[in-house]
Amino acid sequence: MKLTIGKAAKEIGVTVVTLREWEKSGKVSSERTKGGHRRFDLETVLGCASLRKDTEKVTLIYTRVSTPSRKNDLDMQKQVLQLYCASKGWKYKVIEDIGSGINYNKKGLLELVRLIESNAIERIAINYKDRLLRFGSELIFEICKYHNIEIVVLTEDEEKSYEEELVEDVLSVITVFSAKLYGSRSHKNKAIVEGAKKLFKKEVEEYGNCSENSAPAQPCS
């Protein structure tokens, strides 16, 4: 039976993108109609899908820090997740990223997306939700849900140490927008960036002092 790419993908439970990748890699082939449309042989794609199901999927450990100076924290994230996966008996693969949580073009993150689309992983394990992305991790979670990939988040709330990283992410946004508006070498751009750094440094210090205060009845304003 010959099927369109959409119907063939639905029949075997993969995305159209995945089926196209299989065709590019030579795992399946298609015929062309006179109008130039693809037609896939159902028996062939079912056989390829069966082989894919027999391949053991792995747990993907994803770790990230914002700067190279936080390499020790990257190693700590990895150790915690490796121990957790080992305790569950899961076979795992580790992906590490060094870059801002608002950068969508990180090498590790792009590899993670490719692995999701290729149906090569069973679950993703992360220490905190924001390790994937500072904003927009819910989109990755929805894509995983579509591919029946489990998301394991060990800790729901990030530790206080990540407040500084959040500041770095916000500063990077301010720096980019200010440079686009006023030019990266303009005095106004430099003044805005330096002012933002001083402001956020003061806010983090004040928040830290508030958190260490032993009188909970006096909220920090």
Image (cartoon, helix red, strand yellow):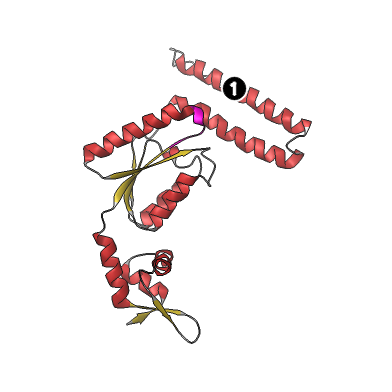
On the rendered image, what quadrant is the C terminus found in? Answer: top right
Residue designated by label 1:
201
Q: Tell me the crowding category of disc 1: few under 14, some 14 to 19, or many 20 or more residues within 10 angstroms, Cα based.
A: few
Q: Quadrant of residue 201?
A: top right
- Quadrant in the rendering for residue 132: top left
Q: Position of residue 79 (x, y in %)?
A: 33, 32
Q: Amino acid at mark 1?
A: Lys
Q: Position of residue 20 (x, y in %)?
A: 43, 68
Q: Is residue 176 magenta?
A: no
Q: State left or right for residue 152 relative to residue 199.
A: left
Q: Residue furthest top?
A: 214
Q: Residue at x 32, y 82 (%)?
A: 1
List x then y, in percent, for residue 131.
Answer: 44, 38
Residue 142 placement, left or right of 84: right
> Foreground residue, 107 or 63?
107
State the residue lying farthest toward the front. Answer: 26
Given residues 86 and 191, the one toward you in this image is 86
65 vs 138, nearest the viewer: 65
- At x 29%, y 62%, the residue is 52
State which region is magenta: 64-69
Kindly give the residue lying farthest to the right in the view shown.
187
The answer to whether residue 11 is above or below residue 62 is below
